[in-house]
Amino acid sequence: MSLIQSLKLVMARPHPAARPFLLASGAGAIAGRALPWRPAKWLGTASGLFFGFCLYFFRDPERVTPTDAHLAVAPADGRVVSVEKIAPPAELDMGDTPVWRIATFLSVLDVHVNRMPAAGTVTRVAYHPGQFLNASLDKASELNERNALRLALPDGRNLAVVQIAGLIARRILCDAEEGMNFEAGERFGLIRFGSRTDLYLPPGVEPLVSTGQTMIGGETVMARL
């Protein structure tokens, strides 16, 4: 990645979900500078640092999604921590036949905006309360708080995307609702402060990525549909 590309990524506009955090920390930074008390100065410094962190964490860069409709792209930035065959989440009613699941772990340094892996219609959205274990652990898929989406492809097959809260993440944001149509690479949600996103491929579809690879949400090709 060139220096210009790196600067564009770091300085990308923040996601709308950042607004309350930016307003609160910005107000704290201004107040801390204005008030004469020493504790207020410390508050102002801490607020200013948190303001900068939020600008970085909530950055929402533009992505160039492949135009080939037969490709499934990464639903999130991050590192692939697991590629294995497993049954889709029971709450999505996709049967118990094992399919390929690609799990991507997002650290606090990754872009946390989630994107649709393919074009299709959301036919199921299922929230499941749970724990807040380290999202890189395999058991996080079953035990952690999560939000699962079933996406019907134009040819009738289904794939699933699951947003999973992590050790620090405490809030899953999802703008997708049942019946909504999405294009590949289109934004549909975000998870705050460290998380994981799982992609369940349709039966018979093989993954094109391996454990340890770094994903770019909306751009990296994960499978050929």
Image (cartoon, helix red, strand yellow):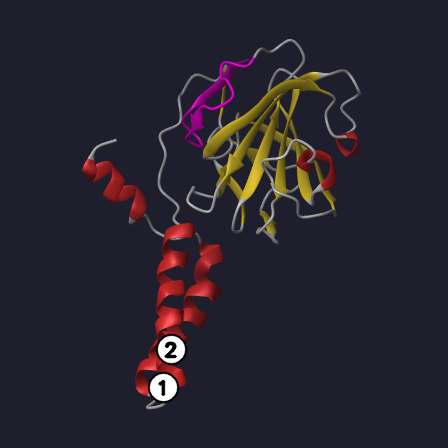
Circle 2 is placed at which residue position?
42
- Residue 53 on the magenta segment: no
| Whether label 2 touches label 1, CB < 8 Å | yes
Magenta stretch, residue numbers: 207-225
The residue drawn where x is 41% and y is 65% is 22
- Magenta residues, dominant SS class: loop
Q: Quadrant of the C terminus?
A: top right
Q: Where residue 164 sits: x, y (%)?
A: 63, 41
Front-most of 29 and 211?
A: 211
Please give left or right for residue 207 compared with residue 86 in the image. left
What kind of element bears circle 2?
helix
Residue 179 percent coordinates (x, y): 66, 37
The percent position of residue 116, horizontal first and vertical second, equals 53, 32
Residue type marked 2: Trp
Q: Residues within 10 Å of mark 1 (few under 14, many from 20)?
A: few
Q: Is residue 189 above or below residue 64?
A: below
**Residue at screen point 47% across, 35% down:** 186
Q: CA distance from mark 2 to mark 1?
A: 7 Å
Spot occupied by residue 150 in the image (x, y as percentages of width and height): 67, 30
Tell me the SS state at disc 1: helix
In this picture, residue 210 sits left or right of residue 83: left
Q: Which residue is mark 1?
A: 38
